Amino acid sequence: MSSDEEQSWRSLLEVSIAKSRKTRGSNYVQISTVEEGEPRCRTVVFRGFQKTPVHHDLFHELDEKPCLFKMCTDKRSKKVAQNAKQSVAEIVWWFPKSSEQYRVRGNLILVGGENEDRALEIARKELWGNISDPSRESFLGQVVPGEAYEKDNSIIPVGGRDDDGKVLVPPDNFLLMLLDPMDVDYLRLTGDQYRQVDSRGPSGWTKQRVNP
Amino acid sequence: MSSDEEQSWRSLLEVSIAKSRKTRGSNYVQISTVEEGEPRCRTVVFRGFQKTPVHHDLFHELDEKPCLFKMCTDKRSKKVAQNAKQSVAEIVWWFPKSSEQYRVRGNLILVGGENEDRALEIARKELWGNISDPSRESFLGQVVPGEAYEKDNSIIPVGGRDDDGKVLVPPDNFLLMLLDPMDVDYLRLTGDQYRQVDSRGPSGWTKQRVNP
């Protein structure tokens, strides 16, 4: 395979996502962080790629496609504290149907209510409006995730909506979580098996084919 | 739910595995390690629980079931170097059908050909004999995984077998990889949603129900 024929990770991923759209949980990825020198990993929902205005610091496109991975998390979850000490995280996305793996290393950016960046503030509100009713409800409980179980006696607004069905404002603990990729390690284990590592440099992305 | 009704992570996992046995890739898990202070994560195949003799240092049962997670890896892969500096790793196992997640933190133990522990030596050879022909072949190439691509011109014995179809001895780079669990964080997102953290102490496992 000549380097001309190789596709960028972003174009490859576009195809993988399209192929697996109908598979249950195909938008679930694993994200790893570091806590006191030890690895931690959990499953999160990938919620698409975040678009930003062209002149934004986080504007990042490849093959004319946005590259910022969009997720959300709870401010009270451990990965938030972990991120304060080590902002590099790695996402693994395994596609069982096509036996492909993407390992995406990058900076994790957490956007809360106090963010003064207008574009990110809007993005956070949009995501809050777009997640499902049960997802919104999960952010509106009063008990702290991970602490010893206690019954949540607070009244959680159904669907995170008011009496007229309108979505409430996002609570303080709802965070937009973005991963800005620096390296992507792609492995294909079916057909023409290969592994390709894409790295982001000052002048854009470069590709290298490596031994599987 | 009273604590009497709670099941150990090991019994819960037994049920999850049985339920998803027919799902493609249901034995694929993600394992995270640390490299130079940064998190790394990739997908590996879970190959069952490793049994050891009762008096072995690594003998570890819960509810009369073995607890050592069995996998394999290549000595030349990065996680092996990572493991030398930080032996704690974390496995995430997501079951899409039942919406359950297990996060298993523990020590990662790598067993190569020079191991003098008879039980582990046998276990390594057994695993080599039990993996698929293509899996065995993947350990018999001469090019180094992750390095710049070069055509592997070595002759790889088909199926890792000799002319009579007998499995060859495992190559030096074939490692048995065991994870000995210290904590298991179980999350169930369907039906009676709950989260349970099991921790291994000097006198065995304790369970705690925590807020999801």
Image (tube, coloured by chain):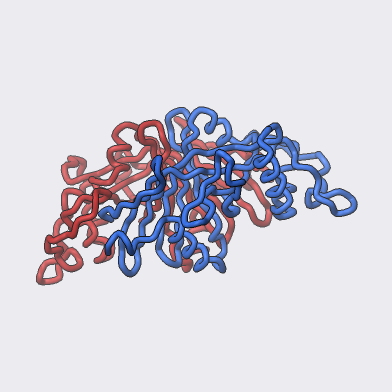
Chain colours: A blue, B red
Q: Which residue appears at 53% of the width and 33% of the height?
A: A83
Q: Is residue A165 visible?
A: yes
Residue at the spot x=39%, y=36% of the render?
B34
- Relative to B123, say whether B184 is above or below: above
Q: Picture coordinates of residue B167 (x, y %)?
A: 17, 64
Location of residue B143 in the rendering, given as x and y in whole percent from the top left corner? 18, 53
Whether residue A205 sits left or right of residue A210 in the image: it is right
Outermost residue on the left side: it is: B163
Q: Quadrant of the C terminus of chain A?
A: bottom left
Count numbered badges in the picture.
0
Q: Position of residue B56 (x, y in %)?
A: 29, 40
Residue nearest the viewer, comparing A9 with A23: A9
Horizontal side, residue B95 vs residue A158: left or right: left
Q: What residue appears at the point 53 percent right and 32 percent down from the top-left corner?
A: A82
Residue A105 position in % (x across, y down): 43, 43
Q: In the figure, is residue B91 to the left or right of B169? A: right
Task: Please give the name of the residue rendered at 36% of the width and 57% of the height, measured from the top-left corner.
Answer: A187
Above or below B167: residue B76: above
Q: Residue furthest right?
A: A163
Q: Quadrant of residue B164?
A: bottom left
Taking the view exactly as shown, the residue that stands out farthest to the bottom is: B164
Along the viewing direction, whichever of A34 and A114 lies nearer the viewer: A114
| Depth check, front residue: A183 or B168 | A183
Q: Quadrant of the N terminus of chain A?
A: bottom left
Quarter of the image where one finds residue B127: bottom left
Q: Is residue B67 visible?
A: no
